[in-house]
Image (tube, rainbow, N blue to C red):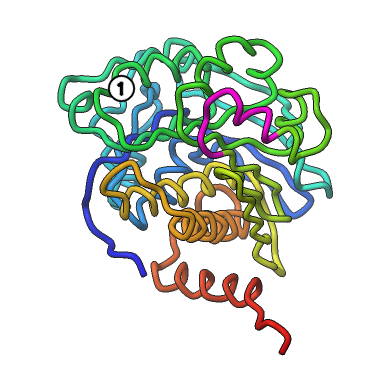
Amino acid sequence: MVDRQVCMKLLVVGSIAFDTVKTPFGKVKEVIGGSAVYASIAASYFVRPTIIGVVGQDFKKRYFEMLENHNIDTSYIKILKGKTFRWEGFYDYDLNTAHTVNTQLNVFSNFNPSLDENLKKETKFVFLGNIDPEIQYKVYKQIMSPLLIACDTMNWWIENKPRQLKKVIKNVDILFINESELRQFTNEYNIVKAAKMVKSLGVKIVIVKRGEYGAICFYKNRIFVVPGYPLEKVYDPTGAGDSFAGGVMGFLASKLKDTTITESLLRQAIIFGTVTASFCVEDFGVNRIYNISFNQICKRYREIKQLTHFEELK
């Protein structure tokens, strides 16, 4: 199914944070998180990702070791004087919506990644996490010969930097976006029409994240729908979207040898992304997704395949 091997580099660019989260099922204080962390952990089950990010002096050695022990290259994480980015939020019983209580950018406000010559030349796969689209575009411009570049975004960038975001979307291969953000970006309620509008900008693939309901992929003239994995316990949805994107990109980076993406390969990638996201929400922070096995991922992959497979009537 998947060969777990070190292959062409997957670069993950995004936030590294300490999160304080409260849900109806509990609370955690200042646990490691951020888009780059969740996406990298999910991707690390398929490839060896490299994180581009920035942390403060309070990001202790044990956090670097934690990431490195999960086959993640941390050598390009910069340590700046000051504190690491912090986010505090809560969820009510609608676990699809996060409510922000407090955001402290700290050293993340000075995040301005400049890649060295090795990364510029050797990087083939890039995931631009949910960060300022101006930074996303700057990274995109530095990659010399990419095979696949994907980006994520959020409502704040859609509202405050729509022109810059549109510039990014025109140049990437995959856009990850949730339903409400897609509607906000296009001013179109119908998801199918909205996705077509976004594709007209130039992006090849639009993957709409639907939380517990799964995802919808728009590729060429085809639509692929995958359900969410049915769970008995959901504790914390923080990072689920990043884990989904990391799983998709990790699988594609492990398989693609050129820019040709087959529909079959894309379908498999989205199911793997759904699986990694399903593990993420089963505990607070990265605890659950960090401590699973590749065999567990494959087991859930097969179970989702069974959910969506049927024989034609004779």
Q: Is residue 197 found inside the magenta-colored segment of the image?
A: yes
Q: Quadrant of the C terminus?
A: bottom right
Q: Please give left or right for residue 213 compared with residue 217 in the image.
A: right
Using the image as rendered, state which of residue 81 and residue 258 is in the foreground.
258
Q: Is residue 262 left or right of residue 22?
A: left
What residue occupies the far left of the structure in this picture? 118
Q: Seen in the image, is 199 located left or right of residue 197?
A: left
Image position, residue 259 (x, y; %):
33, 41
Whole-percent x, y for residue 42 in the image: 44, 51
Q: Residue at x 42, y 35 (%)?
A: 127
**Residue tagged 1:** 78
Q: Is residue 131 visible?
A: yes
The residue lying toward the viewer, choosing from 290 and 226, is 226
| Vertical order, 108 against 181 (above or below) | above
Judge whether residue 34 can be spotted in this image. Answer: no
Tell me the kind of residue under disc 1: Lys
The image position of residue 60, as x and y in percent, is 35, 34
Residue occupying the point 48% across, 12% down? 134
Corner quadrant of residue 232: bottom right
Q: Residues within 10 Å of mark 1 (few under 14, many from 20)?
A: some
Span shown in magenta = 195-205
Q: Residue at x 40, y 29 (%)?
A: 13
**Residue 231: x and y, percent?**
69, 67
Quadrant, the N terminus = bottom left
Q: Is residue 200 magenta?
A: yes
Q: Which of the pair 252/43 is nearer the observer?
A: 252
Q: Of helix, strand and loop, which one carries label 1?
A: strand
